[in-house]
Image (cartoon, coloured by chain):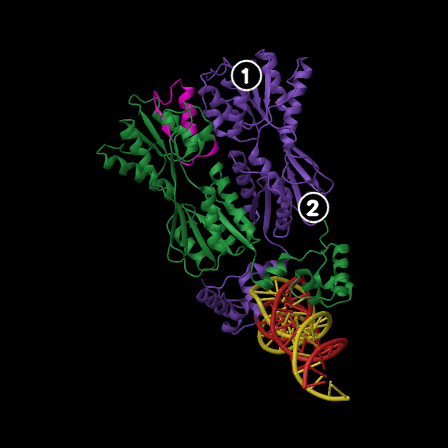
Chain colours: A purple, B green, C red, D yellow
Amino acid sequence: MGNSRVTLRRVAEMAGVSPATVSRVSRGTVPVSPELRERVLRVIEEHGYKPSHFGRALAERRHGALGLVFPGLSGPYFSELIQGFEAEALETGDSVLVLASHSRADTDATVLDLADRVDGMAIHGGTVSADTIAAVAAQIRVVVMASEAGPAHASVSVANDNMKALTRHLLVDHGYRRLAFVGTPDGSPDVTARWQAFLAAHKSTRRKPPAEPIRVGLQQSDGAIAAERLLDATDRPDAVVCANDETALGLLLSALGRGLRVPQDIAITGFDDMPMAALARPALTTVRQPIRELAATAARLLVDPLEEPAGDIILPTELVLRGSCGCGGAT
Amino acid sequence: MGNSRVTLRRVAEMAGVSPATVSRVSRGTVPVSPELRERVLRVIEEHGYKPSHFGRALAERRHGALGLVFPGLSGPYFSELIQGFEAEALETGDSVLVLASHSRADTDATVLDLADRVDGMAIHGGTVSADTIAAVAAQIRVVVMASEAGPAHASVSVANDNMKALTRHLLVDHGYRRLAFVGTPDGSPDVTARWQAFLAAHKSTRRKPPAEPIRVGLQQSDGAIAAERLLDATDRPDAVVCANDETALGLLLSALGRGLRVPQDIAITGFDDMPMAALARPALTTVRQPIRELAATAARLLVDPLEEPAGDIILPTELVLRGSCGCGGAT
DNA sequence: CGGTCTCATGAAACCGGTTTCAACCGTAAC
DNA sequence: GTTACGGTTGAAACCGGTTTCATGAGACCG
């Protein structure tokens, strides 16, 4: 491998000009006489000179990169998140460094390490401790996604309270009596808010909610695990509200595999409206959230030169009724 | 934000020692007298000095980071890949920069940009052009995963030929006659190899394979899309071989949702053996591949000081027979 | 024709660390 | 008592760029 990179000074030497001139030609910031310009460009071309990120970052005191941190990257949710973020970062010519902390113990240390490779960082709720966020925010600009703002950083989240509308729909419009909730509050701020909304819907309709949620993760396999606890029980619920689409689909698969009819024997709902939700049979009733915009907004907050933290930004969501809750339409 | 970072020279000044001494204390490379050491450490502690990545990387001519590049990050496959990679990188104290190119047009440029933020790069097959790989390999060490080695870089892949054993099992042991293949050859080297193995199994048993595969992507929703083309047709296949577990599960969900019995009405198989495969009902027949080890091996090749590219390394896979192909066991 | 203004250019400082080199200390050996 | 040696320490060079500042040449003006 050509470890012997051509440096700016060597180019200068070969072209018979000063290092400053090479830098000016390379960046195009200041006019250089056509003659010298041509000579420098030819040497650059011939020897394949490429400015080193090292030197440039050091001199400019800027990395030209943004960090994106979140817990895992199991499903379409995070995929969508990254794409939204990258698209926005591309606008300003920044690169994106992604860090997925798989609930590893040393996540906080890794995040701090990432903090001095980037100019700003978007952190997904429930990923790292508040202390660590504060430490990072003391150093670079930080935006948290799907969580609350802090004194030193803004936040962007989605309107989880539509979960209340969804739950009310099940209780009131369809008349289901025994609902279950799949997801682990405290696991992430989003799930916590959805569980709260689920409880609020019960309270406002004077129904008794389940004492405990089914505490599993957010992946599809977690939906299957929840199924084992819910579907084989004697007092099977007549509707299951899942914290996200992935678990809902895992649960749906398990229910169908057991020969249950959805929604007749059991209704199932999700949250996200990922592509598979519309394609499943029955199609999944869910809440659509603008994941891409969530990430894009976070990226924008990081690069925009506004001084004050913008506080909490909350993006709207939309209730999507399909077959899996018992609504007519597509079965 | 405390943009006014404490620099090494300021620490030296405040502690009344030379910059060199601060560096030595900070790195612990060379013995320093307890007295000075103590004084320096106190100043560091008090003012929260943290060596800048800039300067260190520049001086050491080393980033302390590895790059990981792959097409998307929809499912557990990539999640597992990253975890395996990170675990190995952690051993040597390197950070990991992840780049997910969502089949964007400018991926190659982004990869080249990443190339000078890291000391080595693992690239997943089917992500970037051969030219770009060569360009990167000219600069830093490169390993490709799930693809073939090139003149300047090693490769690590898994034994896709177990797909032949799987297909033969369907044809010979179960006697299925009309098989379909879900996946897009040429999309990725892995899928290409699996399609080839699927064809080879037909040839070796003198059966006629389908003329064309069902060309869809590798996500779960692609399995549902494949279902629309396969399940409603008049000449429905009696067994469907999917390029990976995700599409197989999407297909399974669609089949069950249509009221079909699996495997009686239609058999379905996958590839990967992700967690959900064992939990589905019926459980999914598949080929287990060591994703974690794949990534760990790639990471090891990047940091190990061996000079020669190691050529192609192929990791073993294992056929996993479960209910979805018609085998007894769990239904 | 002299003076000022503009513009291209190079010398040098700087970004924030690491490392070589030489000087210096005290101690052990002869 | 002098010399050799081992171990600390600071000065300075270096990593690879960017940028300020001063200089000198040429253009323009009066």
The residue that appears at 28% across and 23% down in the rendered structure is: B235
Q: CA distance from mark 1 to mark 2?
A: 48 Å
* Left or right placement of residue B264 versus residue A53 in this view: left
Subunit of label 1: A
- Residue A1 at what x, y percent from top left? 44, 62
Subunit of label 2: A
The residue that appears at 71% across and 53% down in the rendered structure is: B3
Q: If you read the primary sequence from the N terminus, does the residue marked by circle 1 or circle 2 appear first?
A: 2
Q: With respect to residue B152, does B128 lie above or below?
A: above
Quadrant occupied by the C terminus of chain B: top left
Q: Residue lying furthest top in this view?
A: A175
Q: Quadrant of residue B227?
A: top left
Q: Secondary structure at mark 1?
A: loop
**Crowding at mark 1 (Cα within 10 Å: few <14, some 14-19, many 20+):** few
The residue that appears at 56% across and 30% down in the rendered structure is: A218
Q: Quadrant of residue B48?
A: bottom right
- Residue B46 at what x, y percent from top left? 77, 55
Tag 1: amino acid: Ala
Tag 2: amino acid: Ala
Q: Secondary structure at mark 2?
A: helix
- Residue A274 at what x, y percent from top left? 51, 29
- Tell me, yes or no, whether dots 1 and 2 are on the same chain: yes
B282, A84: nearer the viewer: B282
**Crowding at mark 2 (Cα within 10 Å: few <14, some 14-19, many 20+):** many
Any magenta on residue A73? no
A50, B181: nearer the viewer: B181
Q: Which residue is mark 1?
A: A233
Q: Quadrant of residue A307?
A: top right
Question: Which segment did they paint magenta?
Answer: B249-275
* Left or right placement of residue B155 versus residue A122 in this view: left
- The number of numbered badges drawn on the structure is 2
Q: Which residue is mark 2?
A: A137
